[in-house]
Amino acid sequence: MENKYILSMNNISKEYYGNRVLKNVSLQLKPGEIHALVGENGAGKSTLMNILFGMPVIFSTDGFQGKILIDGKEAVIDNPHKAMSYGVGMVHQEFMLIPEFNVTENIKIGREIGDPTPFSKVFGSLLDKMNWEKMSADARRALDDIGMNIDEYAKIAGMPIGYRQFVEIAREIDKTGIKLLVFDEPTAVLTEGEAERLLEIIRIIAQKGIAIIFITHRLTEVMAIADSMSILRDGELVVRKNVADTNLVEIAQLMIGRSVDKFEDEGLINERNISDQNIALELKNFHVDMPGEQVKGIDVCIREGEIFGFGGLAGQGKLGIINGIMGLFESQGEVIVHGKKLDLTKLGEALRNDIAFVSEDRRGVGLLLGESIQLNMIFTAMQIKDAFLKKIAGLKIMDKAKAQKHAQEMIELLDIRCTGTMQTSGSLSGGNQQKVCLARALTMNPDILIVSEPTRGIDIGAKKLVLDYLTKINRERGTTIIMISSELMELRSLCDRIGIVSEGELFSIMAPDDSDAAYGLAMAGVREEVLV
């Protein structure tokens, strides 16, 4: 019965540097079936599709375990060209088009049609003359197949985003022998009308017998278009279901599906005087133009002494909020800190107003990789607050003894595994680099501490230490903490309130003990009244 499936991925497992990201996942599709693949950030969806498409990131990291069968026969797919030869195509979330080429050129790239010339007969087909008539006819046919009236000679540059997406689809449809198409978050950048049109195109493609894998965080789209679905969680297959046999609430619950342990430590003071009247940071109509993380008018008040979390799926804007506050990307609106409006045009304005920041990009933004642990810890405080400086003959020079003492204290406090204060930060492990970033922020002695993805890429032991210490400084120093994380369970274990960001807007502010289903729906941008 195996050969009834156009695709079978059997017991797929994958490790990255000892971290198992897929654990015996199986996936089957029949011809013409629309199958949704859903799960939180980090569930394993992208890794599974990278394996199917033979992406280099898989085979440069020791490959994978398991088998892939196409039409019942084992397929060895170790590069994207092999995937295409087996009839597997992918419409990427990031467009793979050449803006200066026209529609026909983009659809036929790599599969050009040429006519022999005297030169090509001697020197090879690379010197064939392009047959634009045949190529444009193919492009026109592919566009007509998906019902799109786009001029096949129009240049891609300046074309609406939705049309670019449709050209990508036409390119895949034009490939000979296409059997399976993967759509990776295809509606993420589309308008509502374009998204509806895209879903209709997917139905048209499926009716031609082409199987579809549809990756999306929009659960309403799953219910609208998919025949079946697989839910991944923490690298494992939770369940495969027919969409007709489930509902939005059940899907959301299965996606989240983990118990939440609230942080408790008898040694800490848990009683805090948090009042709605005492506002540490307020955002008013806040917009940020961060590519891939745009923010579209957020209003929120964060109270003094609380731990406030921003959550949401990748690309929805949660990182944009924080990078906008810190002045790393252009922003509009108002940022008010303890009643004072910040000048968003001045880089470093947030730092000068007692806001410290631990970036999600510790290697690109967070650290001076070629410099010592000691200098990394004190650098911002030295620049902004003139700390660790002493005057000699009217000149300010670094107080090396004070810097050394402080760095050693932070190493011991945060259990940073290193050879000493002068070891370069670039030679540390990921977890220890993250601790150095945290130490630098704490050296500022901030009123407000912003931490973005504080446990990304670090081991379980280091995660616990970092999270425990964030709670400790909140309780003992009264530091207001704003935390951004893709790990929803992390936010729910630590935060007093959690703002869920969807499509650049603050979708809702939730309590950590709200139901798993409520969180799943909020992450997917579905309001509960839609279900009534």
Image (cartoon, grey):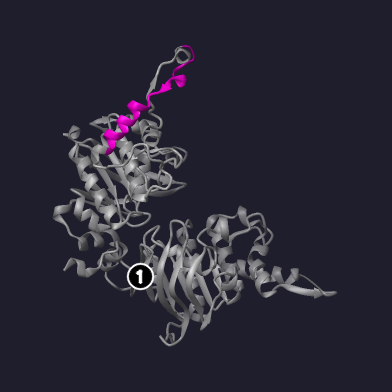
**What amino acid is labelled 1 in the image?**
Asp
From the viewer's perspective, tell me whether residue 504 is left or right of residue 230. right
Q: Is residue 451 visible?
A: no
Which of these two is toward me, 483 or 151? 151
Which picture quadrant has residue 144?
Answer: top left
Q: Is residue 410 above or below residue 166?
A: below
Give the percent coordinates (x, y) of residue 318: 42, 64
Quadrant (top left, top right, bottom left, bottom right) of the N terminus: top left
Give the percent coordinates (x, y) of residue 44: 35, 50
Q: Is residue 128 above or below residue 298?
A: above
Part of the protein shown in magenta: 122-143
Which picture quadrant has residue 385?
Answer: bottom right
Which of these two is toward me, 215 or 487? 215
Question: Element at badge 1?
Answer: loop
Dominant secondary structure (helix, strand or loop) of the stretch shown in magenta: helix
Quadrant (top left, top right, bottom left, bottom right) of the C terminus: bottom left
Which picture quadrant has residue 33?
Answer: top left
Q: Is residue 117 above or below residue 505?
A: above
Which of these two is toward me, 475 or 279? 279
Residue placed under numbered mark 1 in the picture: 261
At 56% across and 54% down in the image, what residue appears? 429
Q: Is residue 134 magenta?
A: yes
Q: Is residue 111 visible?
A: yes
